Amino acid sequence: MAKKKCSIEECNEEGIHEVSYVNAKVLEEKGYKLHVYGAHPPRRPGVIYLCEKHYKLWKKLFKKESKMERFVMKG
């Protein structure tokens, strides 16, 4: 398998972690431009690859977003 680079536009690190584009939209909302692999809308949204640094950032943002959604759903 060919190695992928990080999907964040100006990052040249190797992409280690694969994340669904649906979950990664949190990064786009924060202003990052993403390169999506394997997208065939509307059925397959695709995936992105993240280096270690951007993966940690994504986890932090996604965790906050998930907590907010759970809080709103509880009412």
Image (spheres, rainbow, N blue to C red):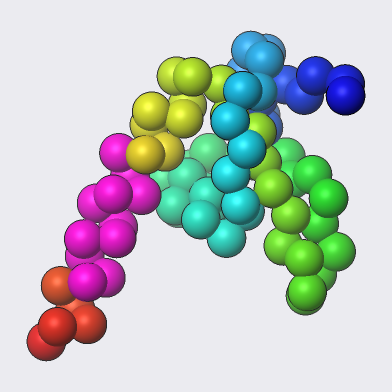
What residue is shown at x 21% (from left), y 60% (from top)? 67
| Lateral position of residue 69 relative to residue 22, left or right | left
Which quadrant of the view contains residue 57?
A: top left
View extreme (bottom): residue: 75
The answer to which image quadrant residue 58 occupies is top left
Residue sitting at the far top = 13
Residue 56 sits above or below residue 67 on the image? above
Indicate the position of residue 12 as horizontal and vertical percent values. Answer: 67, 13
Q: How many marks?
A: 0
Quarter containing the C terminus:
bottom left
Residue shown at the point (62%, 53%) measured from the top left = 21
What residue is drawn where x is 77% and y is 66%? 44
- Residues drawn in magenta: 60-70
Picture coordinates of residue 32, whole percent (x, y): 53, 38
Residue 38 versus residue 28: which sits nearer the camera?
38
The quadrant in which the N terminus is found is top right
Q: Is residue 64 magenta?
A: yes
Note whether residue 36 is visible.
yes
Question: Residue 50's spot in the image, x, y percent?
Answer: 58, 29
* Above or below, 71 relative to 48: below
Looking at the image, which residue sits at the far left?
Answer: 75
Q: Is residue 8 visible?
A: no
Q: Which residue is at a point 26% across and 70% down the rendered structure image?
A: 69
Residue 45, how many percent across, how many down?
72, 62
Please say if 33 is above or below 65.
above
The chief SS type of the magenta part is helix
- Residue 67 belongs to magenta span: yes
